[in-house]
Image (cartoon, coloured by chain):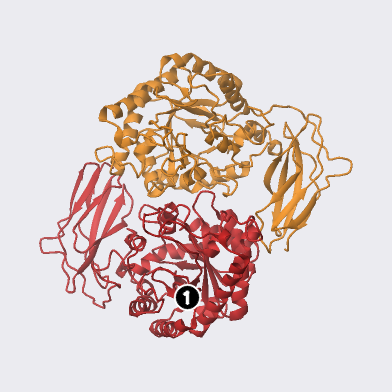
Chain colours: A orange, B red
Amino acid sequence: MLFTPFKINSITLPNRLVVPAMVTRLSGEDGFVNDAIRERYRRFAKGGAGLIVIEAMAVHQAKSGPLLRLGDDQFIPGQRDLAKLMHDSGPGKVVPQIIHFLKIARSGWRQKVDDLSLDDIREIARAYAAAAARAIKCGYDGVELHMAHAYTLSSFLSRLNPRRDDYGGSLENRLRLPLEVVAAVRAEIGREFPLGVRFLGEECIKGGATVEDTRLIALALAKAGVDYLSVSAGGKFEDAVHRPGEPLYPYTGYSGDRCMPGASYPDGANLYMSTAIRACLREHGQQTPVVATGKINTPQMAEDILKRGDADLIGMARPLLADPDWPRKVQAGQFDKVIRCCYANVCKARDEHFQTVACFLWPKGASQAPESDDLQPPQWPASGDGLKIEHKNGRIYLRWNAASDNEGVYGYDVFRAEGAGEFMRLTAVPGGLTTFIDGGCAPGVGYRYQVKAYDFAGNRSAASQVVAAGTA
Amino acid sequence: MLFTPFKINSITLPNRLVVPAMVTRLSGEDGFVNDAIRERYRRFAKGGAGLIVIEAMAVHQAKSGPLLRLGDDQFIPGQRDLAKLMHDSGPGKVVPQIIHFLKIARSGWRQKVDDLSLDDIREIARAYAAAAARAIKCGYDGVELHMAHAYTLSSFLSRLNPRRDDYGGSLENRLRLPLEVVAAVRAEIGREFPLGVRFLGEECIKGGATVEDTRLIALALAKAGVDYLSVSAGGKFEDAVHRPGEPLYPYTGYSGDRCMPGASYPDGANLYMSTAIRACLREHGQQTPVVATGKINTPQMAEDILKRGDADLIGMARPLLADPDWPRKVQAGQFDKVIRCCYANVCKARDEHFQTVACFLWPKGASQAPESDDLQPPQWPASGDGLKIEHKNGRIYLRWNAASDNEGVYGYDVFRAEGAGEFMRLTAVPGGLTTFIDGGCAPGVGYRYQVKAYDFAGNRSAASQVVAAGTA
């Protein structure tokens, strides 16, 4: 099902794979599209995802760090070029995510929704509508409204929205501005232009909303004519860790962990949210498509989610950052050529430290994923893979011989089997390293390991020998 | 299945319902059993749950607030009386939960696991074993080791355990002391005396453990011969909110919300944890029973969990605090006589404020759940229920006429239907009130409401008329 077309309002996606909006920090503070941005999104387009959501761009002209902007007509030419480049580079549809955010200061101070006057609130809806109109002019296929994480519309939707007027204090009131924004945008763009919303399935903060609220938020948005609903989680200011001298960053607390679940989380950690939300929509007769995200990374997992009817579209952010060609390779039956995300969350850490977002697995210093059509896989040396295992100090230590490749060894996948279980891919190790320490083993369980080398095109070497440790 | 017997090691529970350990703050700081404790647990025993876990009692003699103790032989007579009282009062088996905790101060300071010497660590295992031996002498049916929340063994199991020696730094090392405690306790109590463990399915803190770790913790404990595994969540110091002048309390942050999920959480909010844990055990051939907890509250839900094989035993804390006779009533086919928890978490708030734990639904000032065998249900007045609805300010306001009863109206259940859906019980309102404000309604959804009065025995009045608001 993953590679079947899917209709959203007047457009048809070539497949069910979505690149959700991902911060890149590649733009300048001026907000214009630059070469690095163009290259990042050309790769996603070429990679073949059905829907590519371009990173959040501001609907207003508030000061911020590096951030794309759509709050003025001066941004249209650059964005129009980007839309054209992406359409020329691949089959996917392209929508920009548009965002309004409140002010934050290096002192840790932040503007809150109850600091806004009714005029300020009206201006937010107007700015969203104007930016959406610009998105049409740029040639985008639709627009996605950012109602997630720590930003303005999410803060209105929040259970912690402290307003005591018509814009807070009850779910209906918390929904008022987001629904006004949807109405204003729709009035501007017309009925057939796809309008999506990214919102939170769970706030993941003390006193925050869970699916008990968010399924009803989804229902209200669906009834208001939103064309798709993309479910995220967490990423809030309330539990953010303030670093002195830096503005508060909403992915530094537990809710940030839940927004981008790392290696310590199970696959599909947030799936229960989109499942509950979609079930609520369908129970109430709404057919609005739901995008599931959060550590979904294999074709099998994606297919299972679609087959179970837990979601209509599959969002993959970090896996497609690691390898933008994931869709193209998988459609060609070559999942074994995908460079696989290891959820080390170095991308997240770089973002937190205000660095341009890059993947830990990319070649050192690279600002984009490598491209290669090479077909020759890496080879183990004549002396063999030399995989050795040692169990000491409560950890399992692996080391192996370096493989070689005509273009260069890009990395190694480490596979592990628990007890009598099957081998599962555990993590990746960048090509410069030939060791791995496993600190996640329980006593009393036998473990087996195997390693494969891969090159820039994702060609895999023969599997290494199998080594074992622990008591079965 | 809920009311079928269940064997744990050498004992057989009369049914699958478990009262998990619940703090009461009813004991004195001396740690002896007193009348209030006896009455609290007599009610649970009489209520008919299959397994009653008595609140945590300290294995050591460290200073603390009101807390039962089993760290010295002087506590045996009182505990022996309590065990006998409970066995005499109902069919359930009874185990004490035994706990070791580290020091905390009103300044916010707390002792951490890396402050402990190897001698201190050895002493912890010894103290657990000695307390378990006392539990046998008291006539208890088994013993449960507290490895959850913010306490010593949980802090060793934590992904945030900072030790760099054999007791931290890897999953195997984090498990070392908990497994040493299990071995020491087992050596003391023998093979046939049931030994359970309460532990965390997820820490629910930044960087904390998820089921990726905890399923393996469960597996290691199962292989070490633990007789049942009871799954909780959160309740950690790391995200606790420090109130000046009070000791840090581990249920005051988000992880505290997740430990006792309140009204804003879906039913069975933590079920996915026990499901994943049990699946891992069974995949590895371990048949250790798993207790699921966390907002499980209806017989149907309990049956569904057991039928799906997601758990072997059903833990209910707050529902049985609200009505200790839940098991007896449900077994008699009278779920409609149960006083139902509304998850307002007043019990949790009282605990946080160092007050004795009571249920919000109990009569004002009561320190125990009321008992009544009355059969006469409350009546609406001759003028009718008078249920009125008003939709204003983004909220739905309900008010109704007071019902009357021969013994007194104890409260009202409020039922709500969303759209064309069925009536679901939404909440309870204590008997003195005849109003309810619903701030959780979404625009565009029609809502219908209905109210029933109940008395101390749980007899329900006729249902009120149905009133509706909102647009369908």
- Residue A359, compared with residue B418, is above or below; it is above
x 42%, y 40%: residue: A237
Q: On the rendered image, what quadrant is the C terminus of chain B found in?
A: top left
Image: B303 above or below B88: above
- Residue nearest the observer in this picture, B268 or B187: B187
| Closer to the camera in the image, A273 or B76 | B76
Q: Secondary structure at mark 1?
A: strand
Chain to which the residue tagged by mark 1 belongs: B
Left or right relative to B203: residue B347 = left
Residue at the disc numbered 1: B96
Residue at screen point 59% across, 22% down: A36
Q: Residue A284, how many percent across, how many down?
A: 37, 44
Q: Residue A27: horizontal and vertical position, in percent?
A: 53, 23
Residue found 52% across the figure and 77% down from its top: B131
**Which residue extends farthest right?**
A382
Point 52% across, 82% down: residue: B136
**Rendering coords of residue B55 (x, y %):** 43, 71
Q: Is B448 left, or right, of B383 in this rendering?
A: right
Please tell me in which quadrant of the rendered image residue B453 appears. bottom left
Quick check: can you spot residue A310? no
Q: Nearer the viewer, residue A242 or A250?
A: A242
Q: Quadrant of residue A143?
A: top left
Looking at this rendering, what residue extends furthest in the front direction?
B107
Q: Is residue A241 visible?
A: yes
Q: Is residue A231 above or below residue B91?
A: above
Residue type of the residue flagged with mark 1:
Pro
Residue B233 image position (x, y, % from top left) = 48, 58
Mark 1, residues whose alpha carbon is within 10 Å: few (<14), some, or many (≥20)?
A: many
Left or right: B346, with A87 as reference point: left
Nearer to the camera, A454 or A35: A35
